[in-house]
Image (cartoon, rainbow, N blue to C red):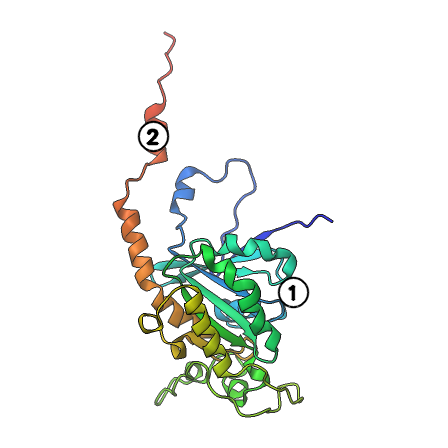
Amino acid sequence: MKVKYSIECVSARPLRRVAKRRGSRTMPELSKMRKPDVKVVILGDMNVGKTSLLHRYTEKKFKDTISTVGGAFFLKQWGPYNISIWDTAGREQFHGLGSMYCRGAAAVILTYDVTNWQSLAELEERFLSLTDTANHDCIYAIVGNKADLTDLQAQLGATQDGLTEDQGEEDGERPRVPSACPTPPASPVSLSGASVNKQVSREDAVALYGRILRYKGMEETNSLPADKMCFETSAKTGYNVDPLFEALFDMVLPSIIRKRTEREGSPTVDLEECSGAGKRPRPVCC
């Protein structure tokens, strides 16, 4: 059976409609398109909510999605920088594409389902080896999604508009942003009314982060602490989603600055000037 792979390109900003006639995109138009300054990749098993996390962060809303085929590319403008976020397929038939997506990544988000222990085990068994093509100083975040099923704070941590409480308030003192990896109460009632048991605890995520550092040959004393790299989120309510991405973007900022410095220091070639200089004038008939 032949499988067709596809990559979907999605921008966090509205795209202008381009005319479909031949030669409509000229070289000056292409030169205005900014290249991504850094790459962030999301890995994890299917049905853990990777695509929903991206939609919640980029579009500020939750919507039902289907399983990603191949991969999807999101472009996020963060201040003066352009950050590409790659959403990868979790199905095993697309497993071989993961190492290609991770090539040159500055940050990798390893996502699991807090109600599914196997989704955490798959991160170490299937997905960790795919990160061998990432940058040597790549940052790794362990993210447990679907926290609204087990954490009462995650259920109530968003308004009906999908904004967190600190985003919804305009007056008075801003409430405290929930910290990473909060300890949820035991078996609360989910939004659907059913009681769901939490199968992955905070200690399990912290232990996985330590094993990742050892796999990468990193010293824990010289690496980012686990309490800053372990998050529990809810794409459905928006709980802890913005703090996750904003914290990662802050952490990869040195990588962005270094990459821009290397780009400015390296010699570049203007294709327009070269093409114009290489043309020989045609003889004019008198």
Q: Nearer the viewer, residue 119 or 154?
A: 119
Question: Where does the image place residue 161, in percent across and percent down from the top left?
Answer: 52, 79
- Residue under the image location 55 percent in, 60 percent down: 88
Amino acid type, callout 1:
Ile
Cα–Cα span, label 2 and label 1:
46 Å
Query: Quick check: marks 2 and 1 in contact, CB under 8 Å?
Result: no
Q: Nearer the viewer, residue 95 or 262?
A: 95
- The circle on residue 167 is none
Looking at the image, residue 175 lies above or below residue 238: below
Viewed as shown, does residue 68 lie left or right of 249? right
Residue 74 seen in render: no
> Depth-wise, is mark 2 or mark 1 nearer the camera?
1
Viewed as shown, does residue 46 lie left or right of 81? right
Q: Nearer the viewer, residue 200 or 64?
A: 200
- The circle on residue 66 is 1
Point out the tag, 2 or 1, that comes first from the N-terminus. Answer: 1
Looking at the image, residue 124 lies above or below residue 283: below
Amino acid type, callout 2:
Cys
Looking at the image, residue 120 lies above or below residue 26: below
Viewed as shown, does residue 45 lie left or right of 209? right
- The circle on residue 274 is 2
Residue 210 seen in render: yes
- Residue under the image location 39 percent in, 71 percent down: 246
Viewed as shown, does residue 70 lie left or right of 41? right
Q: Nearer the viewer, residue 178 or 201?
A: 201
Question: Where does the image place residue 38, in percent across and percent down from the top left?
Answer: 39, 57
Q: Secondary structure at mark 1?
A: loop
Which image quarter is the C terminus in? top left
Question: Where does the image place residue 73, in percent across and percent down from the top left?
Answer: 51, 57
